[in-house]
Image (spheres, rainbow, N blue to C red):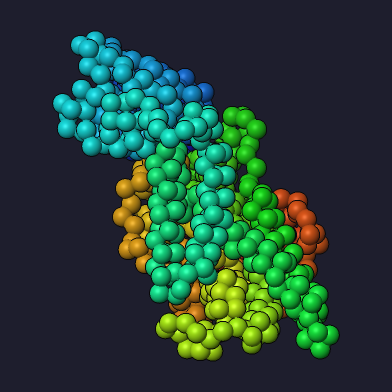
């Protein structure tokens, strides 16, 4: 319709309607970005103002539609353009309370210090609405916390008058300031050094601290009688964790919870380290070097050494490797070309475009909020390796799990042989334990505890391995297993997806919500987390396990339609072959995104359309969908 009128030579910048707006402004108000794009391409001027002094950018901001704003900014509109009262787009989105829009404006370089005709900054406007996400974003980008308006009002006074003190204090705290807006300086020694590089320091500290915690707990438990050792060790462990939690108070806001830090990966690293040390200095000498030839378990020890080495190697590799981040574009011109292309395909939406990375999202990729990047063929974000598991390190992750499982089993055998030989000569007097157990405790309680601890790891590793195994044979990622596959577009980008397949914030926000705030990785921290148990269940991967084991997940749900339409599955054998025998090096990094699908090379960082070799049903589905596009096109253009 529009196209027809334009082609017939309708005057494109003509104003009309009750607010004397141009066609472009009307389209923007209704969030028709395809129409907006069409009008812009035919020379509509986005800077024309209506009778209230708003241009198209301001009007777009009112609705909080971040895609529309991204589209307009890419047309070269000055980001700080003011309306009749000197309000910039940033102020409007802060006032309306859209953290995601505020984020886009700030990343685009909007001035955080700009003042309107009354001297209000964007921070003042954000406090009118009281959206913590917006306030926090502005402070993060260096907004003046003491800026005064013409009438001398600071942000704190504004917050008081408008009853948004709660949000103001919360945002200040998240950004590391006290309630008066002054920098919160820790009182312990060395704090100044620590403040120079908060993130780097905390990452190292929280990784190393579990080494101390585990060592202290094991030593106390082993060194004391059982009835005293266990409670005291728990108390000490709790205190040491409390110390870590106190340090977290000074962390950048995206590291405020232990799950968002290398803490868990540190616990694993510490376990691996202490088990390795114990084996090298105690078990290995006792079961090989000084053992009678008949009692020597050389083969078992060699096996364990191999598994230990491989586990450590793949663990480190998974942790430091680029999981397959989708490369960002090199400039605005390229981004604009991508947006133009997507609009031409009627695919300029959150399933196909990541506002944070400003890229077209490839098929099967997902934006990880922890890493704040889009990851190709995203599987899940794993706290045990403090990294995403994506196309590049998925196989390494699987190998890590396998080696870990066999390593623990081998360790159990060695320590069984060791304990049975040392306990034969130990005294069997202790307070509450049975004599046979008592002998072992008296002989070497430390090794016993370490063995039990290591064996406990088999629970989560076993579940993870089971889920991963099923998924690889079905040709699915954890995300697809949990939420089903949409072969027509990249997976929805909204959920905070961690560990082994559960969105942290519970249900996914409805797609298309304009103020998801999910992309920034900052913003909303007000999620109601489930109960403590539920949260740890998710972290340990119990969720995905139950879903898969009970057949509710897409991978095992035989009656589930989602599974039938998996276009990436070529049958168990081919799936496994693709996964295990692709040409990328097993002991090294692969070229980002490179993989094999049905024997043919694909690159998941640049695959946007479902593969042509998918089964008939998938193709029918696609044809149906493209028919849908035509219908939509006919309706709107
Ligand atoms: Zn992204
Ligand atoms: Zn991640």
Relative placement, left or right, of 172 versus 103 is left
Q: How many marks?
A: 0
The answer to whether residue 469 is above or below residue 505 is: below
Query: In the depicted view, which residue is nearer to us: 474 or 47?
Result: 474
Report the quarter where the C terminus lies: top left
Q: At 56% across and 50% down in the image, what residue appears? A: 207
Which quadrant holds residue 44? top left
Q: Is residue 27 left or right of residue 318?
A: left
Viewer can see residue 632: no
Q: What residue is drawn where x is 57% and y is 50%?
A: 208
Instruction: Determine which quarter of the picture holds residue 306.
Output: bottom right
Q: Position of residue 237 (x, y in %)?
A: 44, 59
Vertical comparison of 238 with 227: above or below: above
Q: In this view, does 264 lie to the left or right of 318?
A: left
In the image, 306 versus 274, the foreground residue is 274
In front of the other: 174 or 150:
174
Locate residue 360, reporting x and y percent: 58, 45
Whole-percent x, y for residue 94 in the image: 32, 30
Q: Which residue ends up furthest to the right in the rendered image?
A: 293
Task: Name above or below for residue 33 compared with residue 282.
Answer: above
Spot occupied by residue 33 in the image (x, y as percentages of width and height) = 43, 38
Say which residue appears at 76% left-offset and 72% top-offset: 285
The residue drawn where x is 45% and y is 48% is 244
Whether residue 593 is visible: yes
Which quadrant of the rendered structure holds the N terminus?
top left
């Amino acid at each position: 319709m529009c196209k027809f009128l334009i082609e017939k030579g309708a005057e494109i910048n003509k104003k009309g309607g009750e607010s004397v707006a141009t066609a472009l402004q009307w389209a923007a108000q209704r969030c028709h970005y395809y129409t907006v794009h069409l009008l812009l391409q035919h020379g509509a001027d986005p800077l024309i103002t209506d009778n209230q002094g708003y241009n198209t950018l301001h009007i777009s901001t009112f609705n909080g539609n971040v895609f529309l704003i991204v589209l307009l900014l890419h047309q070269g509109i000055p980001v700080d353009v003011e309306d009749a009262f000197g309000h910039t787009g940033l102020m409007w989105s802060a006032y309306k309370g859209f953290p995601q829009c505020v984020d886009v404006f700030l990343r685009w370089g909007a001035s955080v210090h700009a003042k309107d005709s009354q001297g209000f900054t964007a921070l003042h406007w954000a406090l009118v609405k009281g959206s913590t996400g917006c306030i926090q974003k502005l402070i993060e980008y260096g907004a003046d916390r003491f800026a005064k308006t013409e009438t001398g009002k600071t942000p704190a006074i504004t917050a008081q008058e408008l009853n948004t003190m709660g949000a103001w204090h919360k945002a200040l705290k998240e950004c590391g300031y006290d309630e008066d807006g002054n920098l919160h300086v820790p009182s312990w020694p060395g704090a100044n050094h620590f403040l120079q590089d908060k993130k780097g320091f905390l990452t190292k500290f929280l990784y190393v601290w579990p080494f101390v915690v585990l060592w202290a707990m094991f030593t106390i438990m082993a060194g004391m009688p059982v009835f005293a050792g266990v409670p005291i060790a728990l108390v000490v462990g709790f205190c040491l964790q409390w110390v870590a939690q106190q340090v977290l108070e000074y962390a950048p806001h995206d590291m405020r919870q232990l799950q968002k830090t290398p803490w868990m990966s540190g616990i694993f690293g510490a376990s691996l380290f202490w088990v390795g040390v114990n084996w090298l200095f105690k078990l290995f000498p006792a079961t090989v070097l000084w053992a009678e030839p008949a009692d020597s378990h050389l083969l078992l020890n060699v096996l364990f050494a191999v598994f230990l080495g491989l586990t450590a190697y793949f663990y480190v590799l998974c942790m430091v490797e680029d999981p397959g981040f989708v490369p960002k574009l090199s400039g605005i011109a390229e981004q604009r070309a991508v947006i133009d292309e997507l609009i031409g395909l009627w695919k300029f939406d959150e399933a196909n475009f990541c506002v944070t990375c400003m890229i077209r999202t490839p098929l099967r990729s997902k934006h990880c909020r922890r890493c704040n990047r889009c990851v190709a063929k995203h599987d899940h974000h794993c706290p045990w390796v403090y990294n995403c598991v994506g196309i590049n390190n998925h196989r390494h992750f699987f190998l890590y799990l396998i080696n870990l499982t066999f390593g623990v089993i081998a360790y159990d055998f060695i320590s069984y042989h060791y304990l049975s030989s040392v306990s034969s000569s130990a005294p069997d007097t202790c307070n509450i334990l049975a004599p046979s157990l008592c002998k072992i405790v008296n002989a070497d309680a430390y090794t016993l505890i370490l063995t039990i601890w290591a064996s406990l790891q088999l629970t989560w590793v076993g579940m993870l391995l089971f889920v991963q195994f099923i998924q690889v044979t079905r040709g699915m990622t954890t995300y697809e297993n949990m939420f089903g596959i949409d072969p027509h577009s990249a997976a929805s980008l909204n959920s905070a997806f961690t560990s082994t397949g559960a969105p942290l914030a519970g249900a996914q926000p409805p797609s298309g919500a304009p103020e998801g705030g999910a992309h920034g990785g900052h913003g909303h921290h007000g999620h109601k987390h489930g109960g403590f148990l539920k949260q740890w269940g998710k972290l340990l991967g119990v969720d995905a396990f139950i879903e898969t084991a009970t057949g509710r997940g897409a991978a095992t749900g035989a009656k589930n339609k989602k599974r039938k339409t998996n276009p990436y599955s070529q049958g168990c054998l081919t799936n496994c072959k693709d996964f295990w025998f692709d040409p990328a090096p097993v002991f090294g990094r692969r070229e980002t995104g490179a993989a094999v699908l049905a024997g043919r090379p694909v690159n998941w960082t640049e695959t946007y359309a479902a593969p042509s070799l998918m089964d008939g049903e998938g193709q029918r589905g696609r044809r149906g969908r493209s028919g849908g596009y035509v219908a939509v096109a006919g309706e709107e253009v």
